[in-house]
Amino acid sequence: MERENMWKQYSPEQLAELEEVSSRYKECLNLGKTERECVALAISMAEAKGYKNLKDCIAGREELHPGDKVYAERMGKILALFMLGDRPLEEGMNILGAHIDSPRLDVKQNPLYEDADMAYLDTHYYGGIKNYQWTAIPLALHGTVSKKDGTVQTIVIGEKDDEPVLVVSDLLVHLAGEQMDKKASVVIEGENLDVLVGARPMAESGDQKEKELVKAEILRYLNENYGIEEEDFLSAELEIVPAGKARDCGLDRSMILSYGQDDRICAFTSLFALLETEKTSRTACCILVDKEEIGSVGATGMQSRFFENTVAELVALTVGESALKTRRALENSYMLSSDVSAGFDPLYANAFEKKNTAYLGRGLCLNKYSGSRGKNGSNDANAEYITKLRKVFDDNHVGFQTAEWGKVDVGGAGTIAYIMAGYGMNVIDSGMALLSMHAPWETSSKADVYEGYKGYKAFLREME
């Protein structure tokens, strides 16, 4: 049952559409490098398509009807969008769910220090990373600083060509004999992922003698340009991410190289699919969530009650408050847990089982189960649901493949699928294959971006 490479069958018209979708996707990757940026971008795109804030509908006691488009967000980090279908909500929704957080370095709350006339920001890595991959590459600072006067300052440094970048230094190879003998997991310790931010002492004035002049110069810069004082780090959310734009990859331009494609490759194509869907029988939904990389915890993770509460509000604005109808709406739903798959890499073939793995260029991946070592932590989708999906994809000429996470005893991963399955709904993991997943720069196939986009549109429109 080997699946064919999708590039072999595209018409000129399809290739043109593929490139258009890929270009939009790359632009979204450039504008959305943090969860806050992704939510803000998605809301602006949704409002341009006529979506209304659910809070405004609730405040105005506005009754919602089929065809209405609404969104709800929480803390600027989790977002759910709905286009109401012709059928009652209690009969279920077609849901696309993806996460918008990605592995990165988070700046600590008391981060700025000076050592040997160099200033650093202390960090705590977020999600599963190989520490050594984050050294000696250009990095950017993205985030939000909340100040005591009530103002909130957004910061992005290192993305424009005329802006400075930051870096985590590494030991020169000439002195690295002992370092090179260490295991890869400890060759760079987490506490050594501190970001170099300056090396120029502030000019002393008068009799004032600063002990840490480089640190003082960094604080002067932050205060003059952003109105930030050192204590404002206490109420800041600052993320260190790779600097630079998404780029075409390969001499044939068949791939995309970018930071954050896990899982924004699924998030943005899911968003495109919903915003381009105009009329459906069942309510169509796209949910973009935070905190998946650390267990889907917290107020903005999938384990929160955000989605359940939002559906309850929709039920109230359509047929009146009903806890039972809310539970029915969730249980009767179909969901694609839109998350990426481990792409087969022939350079590391020993980690994969070739008959049951995801390949770049062969379309959307269906993972019946994820988890690790005996399906631990997995949602195991049932056969009848997969049959329905096969028909929808085949009827709409969507290229798809099935996959697992490498060899049975090698490792594995989890997604938000099992959380949503807890409501009793049908859920399956469905995303695109990536090379170098969780690295600062990940690689995808434009063909998979295109097939995923097509598959998500078909799912929202035709899944019954």
Image (cartoon, rainbow, N blue to C red):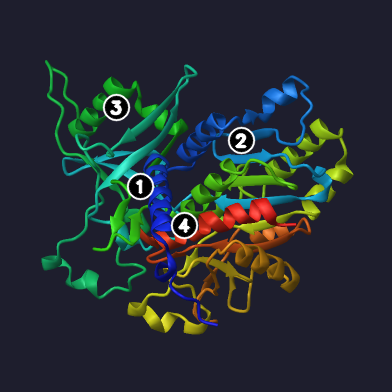
Disc 3 to disc 1, C-alpha distance: 19 Å
Instruction: Name which residue type carries label 1.
Output: Val
Apparent side of residue 115 relative to residue 33 in the rendered image (left or right): left
Helix, strand or loop at mark 4:
helix
Q: Position of residue 250 (x, y in %)?
A: 27, 63
Q: Which residue is mark 1?
A: 241
Instruction: Name which residue type carries label 3.
Output: Leu
Point 30% across, 42% down: residue: 140
Q: Which residue is mark 3?
A: 222
Circle nearer the N terminus (3, 4):
3
Of marks 1 and 4, the one in the foreground: 4
Circle nearer the N terminus (4, 2):
2
In this orientation, does residue 239 appear?
Answer: yes
Residue 164 lies, with reference to residue 463, above or below; the image says: above
Point 14% across, 32% down: residue: 201
Q: Which quadrant would the N terminus be assigned to in this image? A: bottom right
Crowding at mark 3 (Cα within 10 Å: few <14, some 14-19, many 20+): some
Apparent side of residue 317 relative to residue 205 in the rendered image (left or right): right
Apparent side of residue 9 relative to residue 339 in the rendered image (left or right): left
